[in-house]
Image (spheres, rainbow, N blue to C red):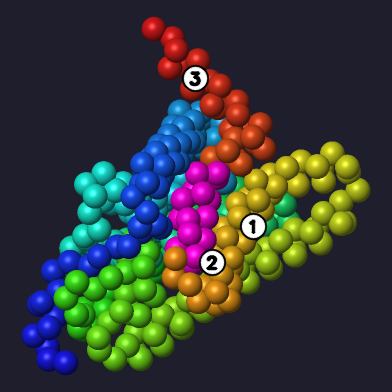
Amino acid sequence: MGAGNKTEVSVFLLLGLSEDPELQPLLFGLFLSMYLVTVLGNLLIILAILFDPHLHTPMYFFLSNLSLVDICFTSTTIPKMLLNIQAHSKDISYIGCITQVYFFMVFAGMDDFLLTVMAYDRYVAICHPLHYSVIMNPRLCVLLVLICWLTIFLVSLIHILLVGQLTFCPDTELPHFFCELAQILKVACSDTLINNICLYVATALLCMFPLTGILFSYSQIVSSLMRMTSTEGKYKAFSTCGSHLSVVSLFYGTSLGVYLTSAVTHSSQRSSVASVMYTVVTPMLNPFIYSLRNKDVKGALRKLSRAASCP
């Protein structure tokens, strides 16, 4: 296929979750509600941490970054989906699709990295409490977040540059509600061997290393808790890890569920429905998990509510 075909593709067609016209108003209302809850919930977490001096600690610094990433993560996909449903359209421009792929990878990767950094923070806090303030100093916290951003920016950029070398047929259909790299590679009209190799290597490295770091951190935390004699100390340590463990389980559990669903069913539609769990549901539930299980966050939210209600 000639290189000229690259310029023929001006739009992709997103098939969405369902082509049934009767379901479109229901999908619009459902996803609009979930999107608003996600943005509002994570924004409240950020504001609570920002305005409460007691929460100006490494753990909540990372949590505020996670909330910001979750807002951006859902904003990458849901607004375009809602716009298409409202306009009775399936179109997304080539540039818009590539941009969506890039930022989806960036924010998904940042979620993964931040959960790993938060696990390391809990490991230092519980296993090395006397040195916690020295090790987790503000400079290191900012440096860790910057390294995460730079790494995922570069990895995502490499994928986008490789996608830019592919050719696509006009009116290419994507059986998904957003542009995902794996789906883009499936519908390409040119050879995608190098793209697939890079995708598998990046997925393995960016998933296995963070997951290994999380598992190692918690193995050390459990070992440290087993040596504790104080029941109150064990409870306090577990309470600080409970929310993070819940979010980690939700993130990796839903991601694994999407992978297994696509591998077992080979149905693009079922895979796209399953992907709703980690692209929409997980970012929506994170604020509830942290606010319901964390006394400090609940207290900060109450203070924020009182401050907002005061004239």
Task: Tell me the tag on residue 157.
Answer: none
Q: Is residue 118 left or right of residue 238?
A: left
What residue did someone put label 2 on? 258
Tell me the residue at 82%/54% (across/down): 225
Is mark 1 in CB contact (under 8 Å) with mark 2? no
- Tag 3: amino acid: Ser
What residue did someone put label 3 on? 305
* N-terminal-most mark, 1 or 2: 1
Instruction: Report which quarter residue 39 is drawn in.
Output: top left
Is mark 3 in CB contact (under 8 Å) with mark 1? no
What residue did someone put label 1 on? 249
Tell me the residue at 55%/44% (across/down): 285
Instruction: Report which quarter residue 302 is drawn in.
Output: top right
**Image location of residue 93, percent across then percent down:** 18, 63
Q: Is residue 140 left or right of residue 187?
A: right
Tell me the residue at 12%/91% (across/down): 2
Q: Nearer the viewer, residue 2 or 238?
A: 2
For label 2, the SS is helix
State the quadrant of the C terminus: top left
- By secondary structure, the bulk of the magenta-drawn segment is best described as helix
Measure the alpha-carbon separation of dots 2 and 3: 37 Å
- Tag 1: amino acid: Ser
Is mark 2 in CB contact (under 8 Å) with mark 3? no
Which of the two marks, 1 or 2, is nearer to us in this view? 2
Tell me the residue at 14%/80% (across/down): 6
**Image location of residue 17, percent across then percent down:** 40, 57
Q: Residue furthest right?
A: 229
